[in-house]
Image (tube, rainbow, N blue to C red):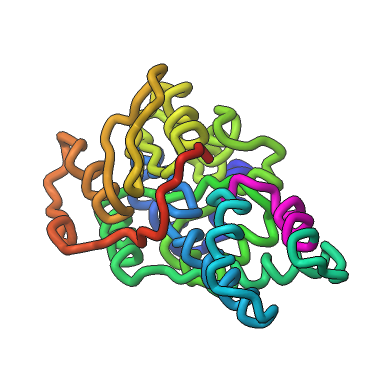
Amino acid sequence: MARPERQEAIDHNGDFCNEALLTYGTRVPLLLLDLDNTLLDRAGAFEAWATNFLRRLGASPDELDWILDVDADGLTNRWDVAEAIKERYRLRTPSIDLVESLDDAMIENCRLDPLVACALKIAKDAGWVPVVVSNGSSRQQEGKIRHSGLDRYVADWVISEDAGVSKPNPRIFAIAAERAGLRLSGAWMVGDSPEADIGGATALGLPSVWLHRGRRWVESRYAPTRTAEGPIAALAAVFDEQPSSTNSWPVQNRAYQTPMRRQVGRLR
């Protein structure tokens, strides 16, 4: 009889997790992956919503920079974003309507790059078990995973609202390993947040890849094992670090351009 955590992971993603566990057992390496601006382009989805919002409002397109600054690359609570927008444009719209509009648009506008999907499939075929570890609301984050089709390429996901703990707390990474029925030993963390992703991995002694997205690393207390421009390069970096791996990485030299819309000065 499978342990509850393992059975839950198998039930959650069926053949993918079941096949991985039966084929590789508990020695299979765990690949912990951030969601927003790592696997999915959260910045692009928000910009699409903001652009459409301003158009419907009849506001100047120049206002886009202000909305992007308020959002702070997802750092600002979406309720605070709604309140700031209401105040600036003197709207009588209830905040909950703005929040729901934003949540729905983020789910609708998030797209999974086919090359990222291909890279995840290659990682899985090479023996990795990819599990998403994301901070945020369960409705929005799981909605993006399912709507984009990302659920077909990962073994499982852990979202902070459901887990009751958020990155960089080590417990959320342990929950991810438990859900997959695997050990954290040998796992890698890939993400774009210096604090939540790389700081969390460092606290557990795990190697990591930081998606720089055009930023410089400024944290002096710790540093990522590797840096990469986008998710494909990040997965290739993990693959290259495995001395026992004899598999090739077909997409390593493929051109992949991370969507670059603005420089991000704060940490998420």
Q: Is residue 258 magenta?
A: no
Question: Looking at the picture, how far across and down is residue 157, in whole percent?
Answer: 55, 52
Against 214, is 14 above or below? Answer: below
Q: Quadrant location of residue 238?
A: top left
Residue ID at (65%, 43%)? 160
Question: Looking at the picture, how far across and down is residue 70, in whole percent?
Answer: 62, 52
Q: Which residues are magenta?
A: 74-86
Magenta segment, prevailing SS (helix, strand or loop): helix
Residue ID at (56%, 44%)? 179
Nearer the observer, 105 or 14: 105
Residue ID at (16%, 56%)? 252
Residue 142 visible in the snapshot: yes
Question: Looking at the picture, how far across and down is residue 231, in whole percent?
Answer: 33, 53
Q: Is residue 168 left or right of residue 261?
A: right
Q: Is residue 78 left or right of residue 159?
A: right
Q: Is residue 143 left or right of residue 113?
A: right
Nearer the observer, 13 or 188: 188
Nearer the observer, 199 or 84: 84
Q: Quadrant location of residue 96?
A: bottom right
Question: Looking at the picture, how far across and down is residue 159, in whole percent?
Answer: 62, 48
